[in-house]
Image (cartoon, rainbow, N blue to C red):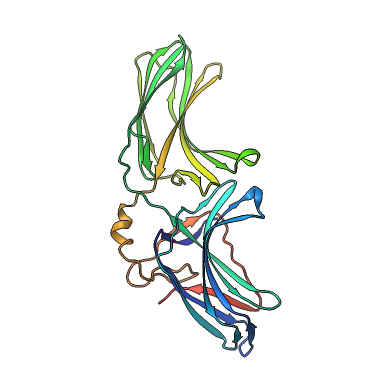
Amino acid sequence: MKEKYLLYYDGETVSGKVIITLKKPGSKLEHQGIKIEFIGLIELYYDRGNHHEFVSLVKELAMPGELNQHSSCYGFEFVNVEKPYESYAGANVRLRYFLRVTIVRRISDIVKEKDIIVHTLSSYPEMNNSIKMEVGIEECLHIEFEYNKCKYHLRDVIVGKIYFLLVRIKIKHMEIAIIKRETTGAGPNMFTENETIAKYEIMDGAPVRGESIPIRVFLAGYDLTPTMRDINKKFSVKYYLNLVLMDEEDRRYFKQQEITLWRKGERLQKNSMVHHGPSHLVAMEGGPKGSEPPRYDSVSSPSDEVRNDEEAVSPTTDD
């Protein structure tokens, strides 16, 4: 099941208000202070006891005292917050950003968390050479494949060709796949997870010498992230084009080539990076100030809401 989260970029201000509602009108709540935190952390699933924080900001919303109104409202603002990495939810690791509101009490604190999504944007790479390689089996198979470039944005199209220079084995099938390789940890605690994102059949039948097979792969329809290299020295995410040939005896021949994926940022520079005043609050409802519509991103992982039977603590947006 997919859920919607508000979307932010590096350097944008996160601001809004926290609304605390007592469950019973006329009741009161004593506390030792109220605070809000903006946190970015990496969770490694094999090491659930240790969370690696790379962003941690805190603001005090209220001094110790007593809440006796049915609903109390506190404004907050984290100005031009650095968000160095893209949000990510993988097989063995999660990188998340969230707001955490804490009502400090003597016995047990009341905590509410709300996740946001962060995207990291890039400009067009200066160097983007084509990929040309020759592979084969001596005196049996010799093919040459070419891709138009080595770096692609997430809505790009991979264009290429495969040339058969020598064919002395009976090939019956050929396909190309996009492989995502997630690597976490190091040494004995290193885990590698391979996931096939997409698979295309590009030939069904035996090729002949001199034949050329075109390749065209559209990336926009797939759940891709940018390439991530050694993020906070905790994990990496890389992508590969995997060319697979199968002969009539079901033997498989394959060749992998790494490609770099990046998130295009031209549209954001026009619309969003100009304004760094109070914009989107990560909230259950509402949106940004002014006329700019809220940006949302859908994520397939469950949200991390903390509920409490005594009172509701809800971040919401400035209206």
Residue nearest the observer in this picture, 137 or 1: 137
Residue nearest the observer in this picture, 105 or 264: 105
Residue nearest the observer in this picture, 281 or 191: 191
Q: Residue at x 64, y 42 (%)?
A: 189
Q: Position of residue 82 (x, y in %)?
A: 43, 60
Q: Left or right: 24 with respect to 207?
A: right
Q: Position of residue 35 (x, y in %)?
A: 55, 74
**Residue 254 in the image: above or below residue 13:** above
Q: Position of residue 2 (x, y in %)?
A: 52, 56
Q: Quadrant of the N terminus?
A: bottom right
**Residue 108 in the image: above or below residue 165:** below
Residue lying farthest to the left in this orientation: 270
Residue lying farthest to the right in this orientation: 107
Q: Residue at x 65, y 53 (%)?
A: 48
Residue 69's image quarter? bottom right
Q: Position of residue 223 (x, y in %)?
A: 47, 46
Residue 53's image quarter? bottom right
Residue lying farthest to the bottom in this orientation: 26
**Residue 44 in the image: above or below residue 99:** above
Q: Quadrant of the C terminus?
A: bottom left
Q: Residue at x 63, y 76 (%)?
A: 104
Numbered disc total: 0
